Image (cartoon, grey):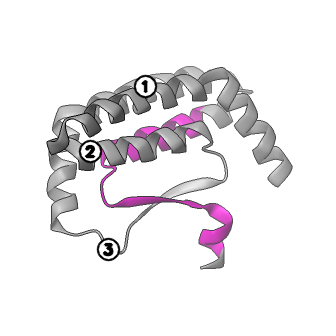
Amino acid sequence: MPALRLVLNILWLVLVGWASALSFAIAALVMTILVVTIPFGIASWRLAVYSLWPFGRTVVPSPTAGTASTLGNVLWFVLAGVWIFLSHMGAAIAFCVTIIGIPFGVAAFKIGLAALAPLGKQIVDTDRLIAL
């Protein structure tokens, strides 16, 4: 399985991962420069890294997340999350039209779901998650 994940990650990176990560990184840079939105910038950086190499990793709630993360996620959802989610769902559906694109469609679904409410979440390797 690790060899298959590597191949899928490389194909993802070359085909769409770089563009997805670049868009999240640009948004993160802008949000980090606007000091008030630094928590959203950190979440965007996390999504940028996740969208570069999604296979073999997943999003889990952070054990230290609190009320501020929930309030931030509500604001994120209203201003950006729903639009990012819809764009990733469109890509996921387009990928799933072909049989060979289904793994990429699943990855796009995962990234879209992570983008709905990214605050108070962390990205972990699925192997590490199973070990816990």
Going by the image, does 65 lie left or right of 12? Answer: left
Observer-nearest of 47 and 126:
47
Instruction: Tell me where the magenta segment starts and ends, as one range.
Output: 105-130
Residue 2 higher or lower than 14, as above or below: below
Horizontal and vertical percent for residue 96? 60, 27
The residue that mark 1 highlights is 23
Name which residue type carries label 2.
Answer: Phe
Against 58, residue 13 (above or below) is above
Cβ–Cβ below 8 Å for labels 1 and 3? no
Label 3 close to label 2 by CB (< 8 Å): no
Residue 129 part of the magenta segment: yes
User: Where does residue 17 sit, x and y in percent of width and height?
Assistant: 59, 29
Task: Please report whichever mark, 1 or 2, sits nearer to the chain's N-terminal start.
Answer: 1
From this viewpoint, is residue 49 visible?
A: yes
From the viewer's perspective, is residue 76 above or below residue 121? above
In the rendered image, is residue 1 in sight? no
**Could you tell me which quadrant the N terminus lies in?**
bottom right
Distance between mark 1 and mark 3 Cα atoms: 28 Å
Name the image quarter holding residue 67. Answer: bottom left
Type of the residue with mark 3: Thr
Q: Is residue 125 rendered to the left or right of residue 23?
A: right
**Number of marks present in the image shown:** 3
Q: Residue at x 66, y 30 (%)?
A: 13
**Is residue 122 found left or right of 95 in the rendered image?**
left
Q: Earlier in the sequence, mark 1 or mark 3?
A: 1
Q: Which residue is mark 2?
A: 40
Callout 1: few (<14), some (14-19), or many (20+) C-alpha neighbours within 10 Å?
Answer: some
Identify the residue shown where x is 53% and y is 38%.
51
Tell me how far mark 3 sits from mark 2, CA to CA. 17 Å
State the mark number for residue 64. 3
